[in-house]
Amino acid sequence: MLELALKGSKSYWTWVVALLGVIGVGFLLYLGQLQIGLGITGMSRDVSWGFYIANFTYLVGVAAGGVMVVLPYYLHDYKAYGKVTILGEFLAIAALIMCLLFIIVDLGQPMRGLNVLLYPTTNSVLFYDALVLNGYLLINLVVGWNVLEAERNGVHYQKWLKPIIYLSIPFAVSIHTVTAFLYSGLPGRGFWLTAILAPRFLSSAFAAGPALLVLLCLFIRKTTKFDPGKEQIQSLGLTVAYAICINVFFFLCEIFVAFYSQIPEHMDHIKYLFVGLHGHNALVPFMWTSMGLMVIGIILTVNPITRKNETTLAVACALIIAGTWIDKGLGMISGGFVPNPLHEVNEYAPTLPEIGITVGVYAIGALVLTILYKMAVSVKEEVHG
Amino acid sequence: MKSSRRRFMKLAGIAALGLGAQPAIKAIAPAAGNGPQTQFSQGPNVLTARQWAMVIDTRRFKTTEDLEPMIEACHKLHNVPHFEEKNHEIKWIWETHFHNAFPDSANRFISEEAEHRPYLVLCNHCQNPPCVRACPTKATFKRDSDGVVMMDMHRCIGCRFCMAACPYGSRSFNFVEPLKGLVEKEINLKYPRRMKGVVEKCTFCVERLAEGQMPACVEASGGAIVFGDLEDPESEVRQVLRENFTIRRKQSLGTEPCVYYIV
Ligand code: SF4
Ligand code: SF4
């Protein structure tokens, strides 16, 4: 099927070459990081995880969000999604590849990465995270590829795939749950030490993933002969509406517990993010922007008039993607490290090379997604066109 | 990269020679494949305990200058690099204020004298260490024989999960080549340098314990820091704990720190 990705229009190839260029720059910067060390980033002994891990966390959510089309189709027999499940699965593959790359670029000694498997340590959440992420990647590769090939050949997919498809559903939930457990099981980090962290991660994932799918569907309809379908896009929009509402609700629960109990350890991080702490307030404008974006997103997706209009729906989805990205990508990780365990405030901001490497990883994801979607859409055009 | 490794091998070699027949230094060199089971070569006078612990009599330290000898002894001995760039900072033992060391016990009104004293902080070698729980490679582990929380710098992948897990900020990461933060002439050839990209922290001077010496900070403290076996009722540590009221950092987290403070 890969040959389908080799036939494309001029703009397709321009896009691929542009991505390769960005990847090249990112790769050079990464070589620099290998040479000099993680010192080229803005991280420190106080904020010891930064942009890489934050984007990793966000993309685990995007990957998990793909299940929002798989589940209704296979479990509830919601036929309309038959056309788009492959888009969800392929999005998950691209997101997971980015996740794994973000982990690798974040390691101080990447050549030793396999130590996680050579010395399996069952008390470490990271061990389980490596297992479920790779497992989910494998499942999506096997399922996505075989189902698409069957569709191309005009036959039903193989029987043995069914249990694997069912397995993908708990796996999708597990990747984001285990990723949340990386943070929420650490004593002394008041911001993360909350049972609602995993549910919060999942709700923002189920908003961001489908929101991205809506945009991708609209884009595919516009640029190819394959139409993912009006009903499908509307159903995704409804999923986004529910998930973003729940996400904000969970966040408010968090605020209530922290500020009604008035336990400083739990309040201080939230204060730092939203009003600043001891005069440090680098993230304050971002966090309020994020909240604003999510609230506008709620208004636009919950209101049936704006949801049914595909233009406003697209705007809403873009806002929700931006809002959840700021929330998780900027606030969630560095917010947990500030103030530090000694109650000192040392802020973090990513450096330019760090951002360059991050963009490079996103470009690899975009390239993988482009190739996979090109294949999927070509098959759909062949079959339905 | 290559040359730094060769350099390291050379230093390790010199170090091994320097220590003669019982090279305790091997303890820190590659421990192939067996993390917590690692055997450490010990000298004839090796000091042993079931759980090493430390009591710091903070009343004996009035000023920053009083703490300097201990910090310096440790950092010199262990080739802890010094960087001007704050983000790259590495420290094993350092000075802080009461409300930073004990954020949950800092009353608004406390004895002025106690408030203005400097406090030494370092890894607590917790009995229930969250850093060890978090590490995905057993590169940091609690040594069964004496409870020291150790680092295998040759296994560490630099994921920094342990840094997120430690509620005391005890761990540092080598963001850049550590040699850049060391003065060539002052490098202690008996202790290995690290490579960039790994985590490090206080080790309760295992290399000295193996040779029958007290940790460097204890030795430099002029008796203000007592070190011994927490599980031995006859030990000096236990005697000091019996006779003085002590506190520990963030005791409510259940990590069971083994560094006690007389305030
Ligand atoms: S103080 Fe921190 S680094 Fe040391 S043992 Fe306790 S948790 Fe681990
Ligand atoms: S940085 Fe090294 S010691 Fe710390 S958790 Fe990762 S592998 Fe373990």
Image: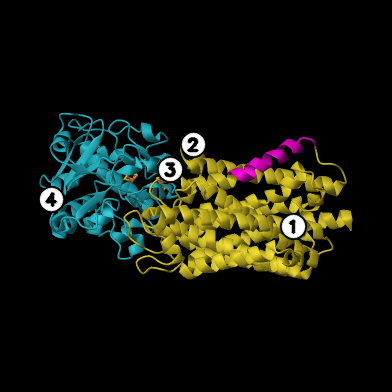
Name the foreground residue: A156 vs A299. A299
Q: Residue at x 30, y 62 (%)?
A: B83
**Amino acid beneath label 4:** Arg
Name the foreground residue: B145 vs A271. A271
Residue at numbered disc 4: B59
Q: Residue at x 39, y 46 (%)?
A: A187
Query: Mark 1 Cα within 10 Å, few/some/many (few <14, many 20+)?
Result: some
Q: Helix or strand or loop: what does disc 2 sit on?
A: loop
Q: According to the rendering, which colour does chain B have?
A: cyan
Residue at numbered disc 2: A120
**Magenta segment range?**
A159-174
Main secondary structure of the magenta stretch: helix
Label for residue A373? 1
What is the distance, in whole Å, between disc 3 and disc 4 at their CAs?
35 Å
Residue at numbered disc 3: B134
Q: Residue at x 28, y 44 (%)?
A: B124
Determine the chain carrying the residue at label 1: A
Left/right placement of residue B16 relative to residue A352 reads left
What is the distance, in whole Å, between disc 2 and disc 4 at their CAs?
45 Å
Determine the chain carrying the residue at label 2: A
Q: According to the rendering, which colour does chain A have?
A: yellow
Q: Is residue B80 visible?
A: no
**Mark 3 lies within 8 Å of ligand 2 (Cβ measured):** yes
What is the distance, in whole Å, between disc 2 and disc 3 at their CAs?
12 Å
Q: Which residue occupies the extreme front position in the image?
A: A260
**Amino acid beneath label 3:** Ala
Image quarter in which the N terminus of chain B is found: bottom left
